[in-house]
Amino acid sequence: MEPNADITKETYNEKLLELVTLRGKDYDKFMEKLYDALTGDLKNVIHDNSDIQKKLGSFEIMIKYFQDREQYEKCAELKKIADGLKVLETAKA
């Protein structure tokens, strides 16, 4: 992943470290922070060169997580991002 041009590499690394740490300790907080990152400061990282299918799988997991908690606004935002990835995938084909 590459940092968004709007944030410094140090800030990017701090956010990434926080996410990695939270994932093992507090999954709920991890998902909230990940959502905030993907819809905020780190939103451009989804356009890196990593596998789109893996990204889409991750978005499906996140959407299911927030559906289970009835946070449908977050589901809608994540679906919008995932749909954008699908368009990119189709354009590359």
Image (spheres, grey):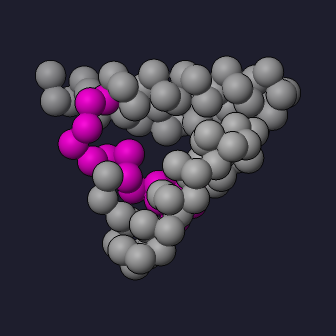
Hey, which quadrant is residue 71 in on the image? top right
12 in relation to 16, above or below: below
Q: Is residue 26 visible?
A: yes
Confirm whether the magenta stretch covers residue 29.
no
Q: Position of residue 12 (x, y in %)?
A: 44, 67
* Residue in the foreground of this view, choosing between 34 and 87: 34
* Residue in the foreground of this view, choosing between 9 and 24: 24
Furthest residue in direction right, as rendered: 70
Q: Is residue 74 visible?
A: no
Q: Residue at x 58, y 51 (%)?
A: 21
Q: Residue at x 31, y 47 (%)?
A: 47
Q: Residue at x 32, y 52 (%)?
A: 1
Hey, which quadrant is residue 54 in on the image? top left
Magenta stretch bounds:
37-52
Q: Position of residue 60 (x, y in %)?
A: 55, 22
Q: Is residue 37 rendered to the left or right of residue 13?
A: right
* Residue in the foreground of this view, choosing between 25 and 30: 25
Q: Position of residue 34 (x, y in %)?
A: 59, 47
